[in-house]
């Protein structure tokens, strides 16, 4: 299952935005209001939970500064990645697009498509408002 957010303009340079996304504690600022848990567990990993959803542990898997940050699930039970593609607009702003890629059976994909789409929209909207 592949889902992509809208492209948003962020009032940070591409490098600043890349640095922001590489620092996992900053993801707490991007999370939806219905978050029930957020905890940094390692320098490059965190656990979060939304109300009614299981806890998910994400870690930084790959970074190509200043244009690409890839987070991946730490568990094989829910195999997915969350990728941030960043394009510099000028010295003080950049554009970001989030991409969710997961390998789920059709039933699971049908159940989580709506909540994941909403989650991506919230992350990208909160990025835009930084």
Image: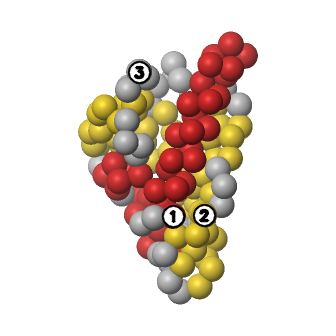
User: Marks 2 and 1, how far apart in space?
Assistant: 6 Å
Q: Is residue 115 left or right of residue 24?
A: right
Residue under label 1: 128
Furthest-front residue in this view = 33
- Residue toward you, 68 or 117: 117
- Residue toward you, 50 or 79: 50
Q: Is the C-beta separation of discs 3 and 1 under 8 Å? A: no
- Residue toward you, 60 or 31: 31
Q: Quadrant of the N terminus?
A: top right
Residue 86's spot in the image, x, y percent? 60, 65
The residue lying at 72 percent from left, 16 percent from top is 106
Q: Of marks 2 and 1, which one's residue comes earlier in the chain?
A: 2
Alpha-carbon neighbours of circle 3 within 10 Å: few (<14), some, or many (≥20)?
A: few
The residue lying at 35 percent from left, 53 percent from top is 29
Residue under label 2: 8
Helix, strand or loop status at disc 3: loop
The residue lying at 27 percent from left, 39 percent from top is 39
Residue 56's spot in the image, x, y percent? 42, 29
User: Marks 3 and 2, how far apart in space?
Assistant: 28 Å
Alpha-carbon neighbours of circle 2 within 10 Å: few (<14), some, or many (≥20)?
A: some
Residue under label 3: 52
Please tell me whether residue 90 is drawn above or below residue 20 in the rendered image: below
Q: Quadrant of the C terminus?
A: bottom left
Please tell me whether residue 52 is drawn above or below residue 130 in the rendered image: above
């Amino acid at each position: 299952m592949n889902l992509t957010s809208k492209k948003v303009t962020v009032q940070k340079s591409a490098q600043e935005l890349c640095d922001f996304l590489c620092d996992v504690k900053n993801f707490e600022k991007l999370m939806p209001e219905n978050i029930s848990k957020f905890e940094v567990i390692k320098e490059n990993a965190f656990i979060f939970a939304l109300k009614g959803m299981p806890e998910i542990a994400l870690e930084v898997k790959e970074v190509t500064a200043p244009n690409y940050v890839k987070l991946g699930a730490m568990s094989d039970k829910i195999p997915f990645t969350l990728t941030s593609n960043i394009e510099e607009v000028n010295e003080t702003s950049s554009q970001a697009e989030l991409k969710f890629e997961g390998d789920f059976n059709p039933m699971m994909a049908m159940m989580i498509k709506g909540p994941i789409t909403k989650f991506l929209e919230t992350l990208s909207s909160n990025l835009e408002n930084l």
